Image (cartoon, rainbow, N blue to C red):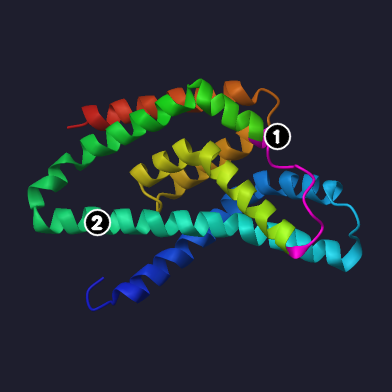
Amino acid sequence: MPQQSWYWAAAGYAGMWMAMMVPMMLPSLVPMLARYRRSVRGADGFHLHRLTALVGAGYFVVWAVLGAAAYAAGAGVMAVEMRWGMVAQWRPIATGVALLVAGGVQLTSWKARQLALCRDGSGCDCAPAPNALGAWQHGLRLGVQCSLCCGSLMLALLAIGTMELVAMAAVTLAISAERLAPASLRVARVVGVAIVVVGVLAIARP
C-alpha cells in the first residue's frame, strides 16, 4: 500500500494469513490433538491441557513460517510486475500452470503417501514425551507433515488468490474431506481433477 512500511505490510499479511489458516486447519487438527492426548502418559488435568496447547502452537508456527515465505514470494512477484509491466500479461498463464501442477500433485502416489501419514498418524504419533519440549516438537512435526500433505491445495489457493472467499472455502472443505472422509484418496483425486480443469480454463481464457 502507498506510504506503508514493509514492516506493517508484512504484519498485516501475517495477521490475515493466520486468521485464514486457523479455521481452515482446525477440522483436521482436532483429531490429531485427540490422538496426542490419548498417547501422552503421565500427564493429566491442567498439565495435559497446557501440553495440548503447545502442540497446537507448534503446529501453527509452521504455517506462520510458510505464510512469511508466501508473502516474500508475492512481494517479489509484485516488484517484478511493477518494474516490467508486460510481465503482468503472463499472470493468467502462470496461474493456470500453477493450478495444473497443484492438480497433478493431487493425483500422484506421493500425495497418497502423505495423506495416509496424516490420517493414521504414522511418523507423527511416536510416543511423544509428556513435557513442554516434547509437545512443542510434536506440534512442529505435525505442522510439517500437514503442510507437505496440503502443499498442492495451498498452491492452488495462492494461485487463485487468498482473498477469494469461494476458493478459501473450497480448499478448507477439500482439506477436511481428505482427512475425515472414508474414501480419502478418491476425494484427493477428484479434487485434483477439478483443480486441473480450473487450470486449463485459466490458460484458455482470453
**Where, by quadrant of the figure, is residue 95 drawn?**
top left
Q: Residue at x 59, y 20 (%)?
A: 186
Q: CA distance from mark 2 to mark 1?
A: 37 Å
Amino acid type of the residue tagged 1 in the rendering: Ser
Residue 128 lies, in percent from the top left, at: 77, 50
What secondary structure is found at the residue carrying circle 1? loop
**Pointer 2 residue:** 76
Look at the image and say whether residue 111 sits in the magenta stretch. no
Of residues 97 and 146, which is closer to you in this image? 146
Mark number for residue 45? none
**Pointer 1 residue:** 122
Local crowd size for mark 2, using a 10 Å CA cut-off: few (<14), some (14–19), many (≥20): few
Query: On the picture, is 3 further left or further right than 186?
Result: left
Quarter of the figure that contains the C terminus:
top left
- Position of residue 148 relative to residue 130, above or below, is above
Mark 2 vs 1, N-terminal side? 2
Quarter of the figure that contains the N terminus:
bottom left
Task: Let me know if residue 174 appears in the view.
Answer: yes
- Position of residue 204 relative to residue 71, above or below, is above
Q: Residue at x 24, y 30 (%)?
A: 203
Query: On the picture, is 145 further left or further right than 30?
Result: left
Residue 83 lies, in percent from the top left, at: 10, 58
Residue 72 lies, in percent from the top left, at: 32, 58
The range drawn in magenta is 118-132
